[in-house]
Each structure stands twice: as C-alpha cells, then as structure tokens.
C-alpha cells in the first residue's frame, strides 16, 4: 500500500455506525477543539472511503467546509471563510434526514447560518453535538 499521508480510516456501514467509528468521532472532537486542519485530514480520508459520492461523503465534505471556514476565519480571510460556510449549507441541503451520523442537520444549518450572519471578527466557534 502506498503512503499518502492521509490517516487510514474505515467507511461507515450505517448512520448509526458513527458510534463505532473512532476516526469519525475523533474528527468531530478535533473540529470542536479548534484543530481544523487535522479534522480536515480525517474527514477527507473518510470522504475518500465513501468514494466522494454518497450521503456520508456529502456530510463529511460539509464538515470539511466548516473546518476550512473556521481556519480562514482565524486567518482573517473574510471572503474565503464565507465561501466555505455557504458551500457547507449547500451540501447540507442535499441531505434529506432529520438526523444523520449523530448530527441534527437543521441544528447544524442554523449554527452555520448564525456564523455567516456575524462579522468575521465575531464569528463564534462551532460545536458539533453528536446524539449518542
């Protein structure tokens, strides 16, 4: 196997399987604690495990966009931050679930929309709550 620098992860088998996927749980912990780049690496690996196409991949990409937006916020890049957060909302709109992989999707959309409504310097951190 070729080393890509990406963490090796396992695909989720069902929405409820998130509870048993330490890589997914770790990625959520990383974003919640401000390790945006590291979160991105784990979620990108999971995204690739799902061939970048299914609903899981869409959710992972949406969270990657949150991580990228928060990283750009911390770098003071208003336009890039907003672009990533807007793209996150577009991706979340593609998912037709109330709750998916432990995340209440409408609650996440509200949090991201709230971030977008604030000036860059006062955009809050975002905590993704998992329903265990």
Image (cartoon, rainbow, N blue to C red):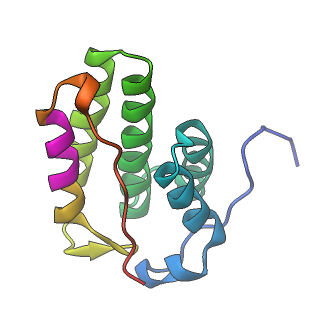
112 part of magenta stretch: yes
What are the residue bounds of the magenta stretch?
110-116
Residue 97 as seen in the image, left or right of residue 41 = left
Residue 95 visible in the current orientation: no
Q: Residue 58 in the image: x percent, y percent?
A: 36, 53
Q: Residue 60 in the image: x percent, y percent?
A: 44, 53
Residue 42 visible in the current orientation: yes
As drawn, the residue found furthest toward the right would be 1
> Image point 64% across, 64% down: which residue?
23
* Number of marks in the rendered image: 0
Q: Is residue 31 above or below residue 9?
A: above
Q: Is residue 6 above or below residue 32?
A: above
Q: Is residue 70 above or below residue 97?
A: above
Relative depth, front residue between 95 and 74: 74
Relative depth, front residue between 60 and 121: 121
24 part of magenta stretch: no
Q: Residue 107 in the image: x percent, y percent?
A: 19, 63
> Image point 40% across, 73% down: which residue?
130
Residue 60 as seen in the image, left or right of residue 26 = left
**Quadrant of image for the C terminus:** bottom left
Q: Name the main secondary structure of what is drawn in magenta.
A: helix
As drawn, the residue found furthest toward the left would be 117
> Image point 35% across, 15% down: which residue?
77
As drawn, the residue found furthest toward the front would be 122
Q: Is residue 86 above or below residue 130?
A: above
Relative depth, front residue between 107 and 86: 107
Image-quadrant location for residue 84: top left
Q: Residue 35 in the image: x percent, y percent?
A: 57, 43
> Image point 34% across, 49% down: which residue?
126
């Amino acid at each position: 196997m070729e080393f890509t620098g990406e963490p090796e992860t396992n695909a989720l088998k069902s929405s409820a399987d998130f509870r048993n996927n330490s890589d997914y749980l770790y990625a959520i912990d990383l974003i919640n604690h401000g390790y945006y780049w590291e979160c991105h690496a784990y979620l990108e690996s999971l995204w690739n495990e799902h061939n970048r196409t299914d609903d899981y991949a869409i959710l992972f990409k949406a969270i990657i966009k949150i991580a990228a937006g928060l990283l750009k916020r911390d770098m003071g890049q208003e336009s890039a931050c907003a672009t990533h957060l807007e793209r996150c909302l577009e991706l979340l709109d593609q998912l037709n679930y109330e709750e998916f992989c432990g995340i209440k999707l409408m609650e996440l959309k509200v949090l991201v929309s709230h971030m977008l409504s604030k000036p860059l310097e006062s955009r809050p951190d975002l905590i993704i709550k998992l329903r265990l």
